[in-house]
Image (spheres, rainbow, N blue to C red):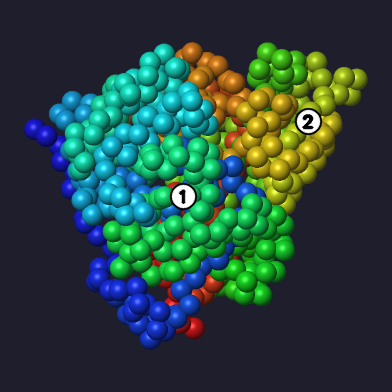
């Protein structure tokens, strides 16, 4: 029997068709809620640094992904609760053995220049993302999706044309997998799987992403880009659901300092900004309708450099475990951040769908007991007052990262006598240094690409593109591979988390909460979407 998943043809946000002009008069009401809409349908938000790329094939950070979801549309989107809803695809079928997925595409999807969006555009984009020529930092995602021949294409062993994806016709996309993957459909909401316009890419090369050149298929088009300052996108009249899009203009502002951004937010210059570390209790009292904290599918951690050329002391698992034990996570979440974050003793976020947090012995110990064990382990490794341990810790420029780094370096000093040198780097420089292994200990943050534990734990796989520690464990690799075809992979995930706690290639520090200030007139934010994937087309402003 063929499994068929049929998705609703409209999102829950906009059920009644209306024209764009209707939303501009200041007296219109939202078609579902009946709220009076503001005449000014703009949204301005702050980010802390410039994204390395907004090319779907190259995007690797969450802020860049937020932009890409507006400019481009993949097979499926997510609704306010994180459920799949139609994008370019209306539905899909999976074969009985789970190895072939057939997507039926809508026939009214267009590029911003009026060209139709076809199955061939997805084939081109996926082959491009996997190709050694593009050298995408996210090419490994194609292999993670278990797409047939993905690994061989990425390695350069075969031509990208042999990737297991075919345009049967303009509105039928066939994807062949090397093994069944129960959560495969969830993975196509990620930017790496979005289509790109082949003629534009081939004409302009790397400059195709500039406002004057870009052709995109999302609800918005790129109209202005000033690096390290702002990025502006405006409604795309060619978008298939433009008549149900309410926001006209979306502006991303780059403001490095969180406190400066908060001041500008309170002055009315922005509609969304992050709550600086430690300020949520105060702001939630002063602005209870604006300060929001909800769980977010991200984990904050420190990674050790385990390459052969890395410092010898970090090759010792007892040293790494001692440093992990000496981190008082309760102080980090309750005093330094104070925004609803949760202490982390596993890499996988506690709220991940279907995941049951395993019993990690460290988690049930008192901090005093952890400190005592840390001191014993470090002394056993030969470090102490006569031979102090020195560490370089690098993080990307951000006041919250700085506050956490200072607190942890003080914990290491007080408990273990460790001398820590802190260094901050601009985001793109930091990513390059971390990827090249130019660090002793580095800050890491991983946000789920889909809502399943493997999105975290696959980073521990030896060949993962974001295994920047270069942790290698054949048993972990086997457990992760086996989990992909298991009806109940929890036991495998438990063992991988146990290996992380035992070998300590990383130090899980806390599980994220999304802690932001939102303008009272901004509506439609998907607070219940665990991944916090938001689409400007689903947002709107109400009249004050």
> Of marks 2 and 1, which one's residue comes earlier in the chain?
1
For label 2, the crowd category at 10 Å Cα-Cα, with few meaning under 14, some 14 to 19 and many 20 or more, is: few
Point 49% across, 56% down: residue: 222
Residue 451 seen from this side: no
Total number of numbered discs in the rendering: 2
Q: Which mark is residue 17?
A: none
Dot in front, 2 or 1: 1
Split into 4 quadrants, where in the image is the N terminus? top left
Residue 426 seen from this side: yes
Q: Which residue is mark 2?
A: 392
Q: Which residue is mark 1?
A: 214
Point 31% across, 34% down: residue: 123
Kindly indicate the quadrant of the structure image that contains residue 45. Answer: bottom right
Helix, strand or loop status at disc 1: loop
Instruction: Give whichever of 106, 377 is nearer the camera.
Output: 106
Q: Residue 131: image x %, image y %?
A: 44, 26
């Amino acid at each position: 029997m063929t499994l068929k998943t049929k998705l609703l043809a409209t999102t829950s946000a906009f059920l009644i068709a209306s024209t764009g002009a209707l939303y501009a008069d200041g007296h219109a009401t939202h078609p579902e809620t009946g709220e009076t809409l503001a005449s000014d349908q703009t949204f301005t938000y702050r980010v802390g640094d410039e994204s390395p790329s907004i090319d779907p094939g190259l995007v690797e950070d969450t802020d860049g992904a937020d932009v890409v979801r507006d400019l481009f549309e993949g097979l499926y989107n997510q609704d306010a609760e994180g459920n799949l809803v139609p994008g370019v695809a209306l539905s899909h079928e999976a074969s009985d053995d789970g190895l072939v997925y057939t997507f039926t595409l809508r026939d009214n999807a267009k590029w911003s220049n009026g060209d139709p969006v076809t199955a061939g555009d997805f084939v081109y984009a996926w082959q491009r993302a996997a190709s050694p020529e593009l050298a995408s930092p996210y090419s490994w995602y194609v292999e993670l999706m278990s797409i047939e021949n993905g690994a061989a294409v990425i390695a350069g062993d075969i031509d990208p044309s042999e990737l297991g994806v075919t345009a049967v016709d303009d509105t039928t996309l066939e994807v062949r997998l090397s093994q069944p993957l129960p959560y495969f459909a969830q993975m196509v909401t990620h930017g790496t799987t979005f289509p790109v316009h082949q003629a534009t890419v081939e004409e302009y090369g790397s400059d195709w992403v500039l406002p004057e050149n870009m052709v995109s298929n999302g609800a918005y088009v790129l109209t202005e880009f000033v690096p390290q300052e702002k990025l502006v996108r405006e409604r795309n009249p060619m978008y298939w659901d433009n008549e149900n899009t309410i926001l006209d203009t979306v502006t991303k502002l780059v403001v490095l300092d969180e406190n400066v951004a908060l001041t500008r937010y309170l002055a009315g210059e922005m509609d969304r900004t992050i709550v600086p570390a430690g300020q949520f209790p105060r702001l939630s009292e002063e602005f209870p309708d604006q300060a929001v904290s909800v769980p977010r599918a991200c984990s904050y951690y420190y990674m050790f450099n385990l390459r052969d050329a890395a410092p010898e002391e970090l090759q010792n698992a007892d040293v790494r475990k001692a440093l992990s034990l000496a981190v008082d996570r309760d102080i980090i979440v309750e005093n330094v951040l104070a925004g609803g974050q949760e202490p982390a003793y596993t890499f996988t976020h506690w709220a991940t769908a279907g995941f049951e947090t395993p019993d990690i012995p460290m988690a049930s110990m008192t901090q005093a007991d952890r400190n005592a064990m840390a001191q014993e382990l470090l002394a056993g490794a030969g470090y102490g007052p006569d031979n102090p341990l020195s560490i370089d810790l690098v993080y990307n420029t951000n006041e919250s990262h700085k506050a956490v780094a200072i607190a942890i370096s003080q914990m290491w000093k007080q408990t273990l006598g460790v001398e820590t040198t802190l260094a901050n780097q601009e985001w793109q420089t930091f990513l390059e240094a971390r990827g090249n292994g130019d660090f002793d200990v580095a800050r890491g943050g991983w946000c789920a690409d889909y809502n399943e534990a493997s999105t975290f734990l696959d980073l521990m796989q030896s060949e993962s593109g974001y295994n920047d520690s270069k942790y290698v464990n054949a048993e972990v690799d086997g457990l992760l591979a086996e989990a992909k075809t298991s009806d109940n992979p929890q036991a495998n995930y438990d063992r991988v988390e146990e290996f992380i706690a035992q070998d300590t290639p990383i130090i899980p520090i806390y599980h994220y909460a999304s802690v932001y200030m939102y303008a009272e007139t901004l509506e439609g934010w998907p607070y219940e979407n665990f991944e916090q994937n938001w689409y400007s087309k689903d947002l709107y402003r109400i009249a004050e």
